[in-house]
Amino acid sequence: MSLRSDAELVHAAAHGDADAFGELSRRYRDRYTRFAVRMIGSRDEAEDVLQSAFIRAYRALDRCRDASRFGAWMYQIVANECRTYVVRRGRRDARLVRDESSLRAVVDRASTDRQETLEDVEYALQQIDADQREAFVMKHVEELSYDEMAEITGVSVSALKMRVKRACARLRELLEEVYDV
Amino acid sequence: MSDRSHDQDAAFAERVGHVLRAPERLSDDFDRALVAAIRNDQPTAAAMRRRSSMLSRDWWAAPPALSRAANLALAASIAALVAIGAWTIVPTASPTNHVVAAGSVHDTVTFVRFVFVGQARSVSLVGDFNQWGATPLPLRATGTGDAWAASVPVASGRHEYAFIVDGKHWVADPFAPRESDEFDTNSSVITVGL
């Protein structure tokens, strides 16, 4: 594991050191993986989106104003990439995500109650608006503060609170039929 | 909003959030693929690699020790292009469109999703984009257990590839145009971004 700081790695990567950027990726990727999977609804597609996000970041390293805050800057790019992907994918592929999840559950005979619950909640999450989903995941899954969310999304705190509230209401509607929530 | 209603909403959000906080992991080859994609993103480095890959095909042109399994005859596979935000079937090059892009320089990388459908214990991908196996590219089993997939960064241009099934069977993609070498070993052809 490299002892170099984020700023040192960003500087090296900006000068063409691909391994330095690989180190940054290893340092931060786990932080974004769950967020991307919850936003996209498919692990494989989320991985593709993360790859694209990291490549986009690599190309834009010279625009990372504060290299010591690479993690926060990268989070913005990941969120943007997920948002763009979801918008473009549209509803047709959302149905495919459900099919994929169902298949996975059928194959995984040893799935626990927790996994089945996760599948249903993931499905419900995919049914709500992307903006609301993003706000809910940041707040209640990644447990970010509203100030952090505002920095990443560029949306006001009051608007984010409204999105989270609406997301909760919609999720409750969707899950009421399955669980006694 | 009453305090009770607020508490109920908070409790609901926490319960749902708790479920969704289950950890997620990327595949083990994520970093390697990313660094490879970044290196490919540099036009000069990409051009150098393509030249070396043209030279490194010699080992593969030797008579193959690999035999194709008859029970894989029904195996079906597709290569699909994952553009950012969209799934698109790649229009593959016709067999007559045999232009090697070794001398050109590309500055874009596209993730191509290679899918092999069929029973197997392991499946990996070899092609000119990984110097025919110099960099391992294992496919991962999908949920149904009879399909294997991997997303691979590929530079724009025409590429040849094949699947290695169970570590020993060389299988060309039945749904892609084929290219044969002088020893009648088939590989498949894909054209990206042209």
Image (cartoon, coloured by chain):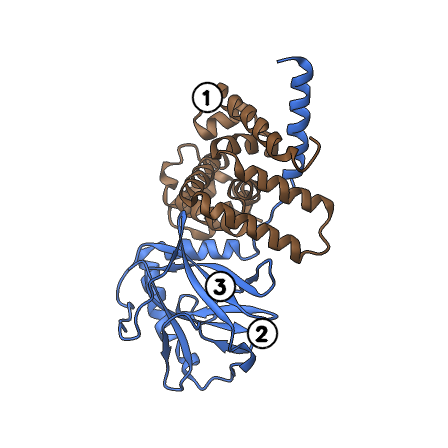
**How many badges with numbers are in the image?**
3
Identify the residue under disc 3. B115
Which badge, 2 or 3, comes first in the chain's sequence?
3
Nearer to us of marks 2 and 3 is: 3
Question: Can you name the residue that lies furthest to the top here?
Answer: B2
Q: Amino acid at mark 3?
A: Val
Name the element at disc 2: loop
Residue B116: image location, x then y, percent: 50, 67
The residue shown at (54%, 25%) is A166
Q: Nearer the viewer, residue B63 or B56?
A: B63
Q: Is residue B130 visible?
A: yes
Q: CA distance from mark 2 to mark 3?
A: 15 Å
Chain shown in blue: B
Q: Nearer the viewer, residue B40 or B189?
A: B189
Q: Residue B105 vs residue A96: left or right?
A: left
Identify the residue under disc 1. A156
Q: Nearer the viewer, residue A155 or A126?
A: A126
Q: CA distance from mark 1 to mark 2?
A: 54 Å
Name the element at disc 1: loop
